[in-house]
Amino acid sequence: MSSEINQIDLRKIKNIEQVTKINEILNNEIDEVVILTDQEVIIKMIPLQIINKNLVCQMKAINDYWKIKLERKNK
């Protein structure tokens, strides 16, 4: 049984639109999602916003963008 991870690529949209999209994502229930971004502001805002959301965050720099994996704790 394999579950597909939802991947959201934000790299081609403007900074303010990326912030809006991240807020939308974090306002929904998340089991697991991977977010690709080229904006440092996203890297700074996600950890602060998930503190009380029972989520684990992993971030990895890949060339000129970031890969952010959010996953529910105790899945």
Image (spheres, grey):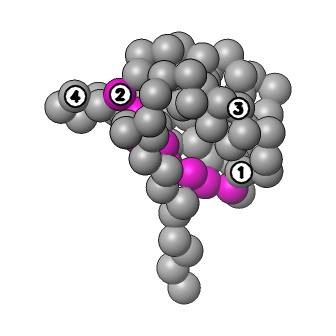
The 10 Å Cα crowd at callout 3, few under 14, some 14 to 19, many 20 or more, is some
> Can you tell which mark lies on residue 23?
3
Q: Upstream in the sequence, badge 2 or badge 3?
A: 3
- Residue 11 % position (x, y): 37, 37
Mark toward the viewer: 2 or 1: 2
> Can you tell which mark lies on residue 64?
4
> Element at badge 4?
loop
Magenta-colored stretch includes residue 34: yes
- Residue 40 % position (x, y): 42, 16
Q: Do the residues labelled 2 and 1 touch (CB within 8 Å)?
A: no
Q: Are marks 2 and 3 in contact (CB under 8 Å)?
A: no
In this figure, which residue is indicated by the disc labeled 2?
38
Q: Upstream in the sequence, badge 4 or badge 3?
A: 3
In this figure, which residue is indicated by the disc labeled 1?
30
The 10 Å Cα crowd at callout 2, few under 14, some 14 to 19, many 20 or more, is many
Tell me the amino acid under the disc marked 3.
Asn
Q: Which residue is at a point 55% across and 74% down the rendered structure image?
A: 3
Q: Magenta region: which residues? A: 31-38
> Element at badge 2?
loop
Main structural element of the magenta stretch: helix, strand or loop?
Answer: strand
Q: Upstream in the sequence, badge 3 or badge 1?
A: 3
> Element at badge 1?
loop
Tell me the amino acid under the disc marked 4.
Asp
Q: Which residue is at a point 37% across and 39% down the rendered structure image?
A: 12
The 10 Å Cα crowd at callout 1, few under 14, some 14 to 19, many 20 or more, is some
Q: Upstream in the sequence, badge 4 or badge 1?
A: 1
